[in-house]
Image: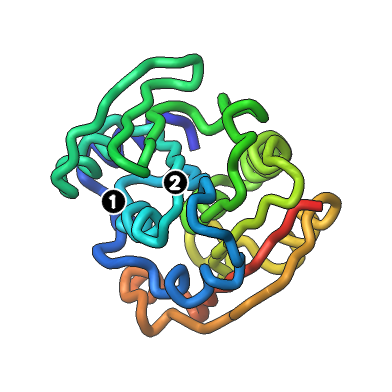
Amino acid sequence: MQPDFWLQKWQDNQIPFHQHKVMPLLEKHWPALQLPAGSQVFVPLCGKSLDLAWLAAQGHRVLGLELSPLAVAQFFAEHGLTPQTRVTRYGTHYTAGAIELICGDVFDVDAELLADCAGVYDRAALIALPEPLRARYVDEVYGRLPAHCRALLITLEYAQHERAGPPFSVDADEVQARYAAHWTIAPLERREILADEPRFAADGMTALHTTVYRLQRR
């Protein structure tokens, strides 16, 4: 997906991926990461997710990265926050309390920016990218995270020929192939969710699973 694709989605308010409640799988499985309060958590391709505020409410410092300035502006407006702004080589930083969102390109992050990240929450980043970009994303973004960093990764699995992404299907074999060299992978839950996703069912899909993984960088 080229950047203009996502910018246009936000411009047209075509954002079915945005959930109007905190992700239940986040609430259920986040404790498995055992991150202490005050830890910095990186949320790539974060949109205006309510999960950002939930993570901050758990006592974390949240570092989100989002391409769309509309998404960033809407997040702060919808939460009644007035952020302070500054510009760096990564993009424009918007900070209010424990939440800092960078409006920029996720592939511009580096080890210096991510050095303090103890955790990652990836619900909508890996599955938003087609296969060639997924390879680059894991190599260049996850590859710049510090040792012992922990991540909660949530994927979707379905027959890719039944529906054009995004979101894309990322099965367990792909997670293993992309992460196993540098990360310890622990599946936490896999469940069938097609009955709860009418927009996918309307496309004629026959099955849809979501899987939650705990990752730890070695």
Which secondary structure, mark 1?
loop
Q: Give above or below for 184 relative to 82.
A: below
Q: Nearer the viewer, residue 145 or 180?
A: 145
Which three-letter amino acid code belongs to the residue tagged 2?
Answer: Arg
Question: Callout 1: few (<14), some (14-19), or many (20+) C-alpha neighbours within 10 Å?
Answer: few
Residue 166's place in the image compared with 100, above or below, is below
Per the image, the residue denoted by label 1 is 15
116 or 166: which is nearer to us? 116
Can you see residue 178? no
Return the x and y of residue 72 as percentages of the image width and height. Answer: 29, 37
Please name the residue shown 25% across and 48% down the image. Answer: 14
Residue 61, numbered circle: 2
| x and y percentages locating residue 210 in the rendered image | 53, 73
- How far, Cα to Cα, is label 2 from label 1? 26 Å
Secondary element type, mark 2:
strand
Task: Give x and y (percent) for residue 12.
Answer: 21, 40
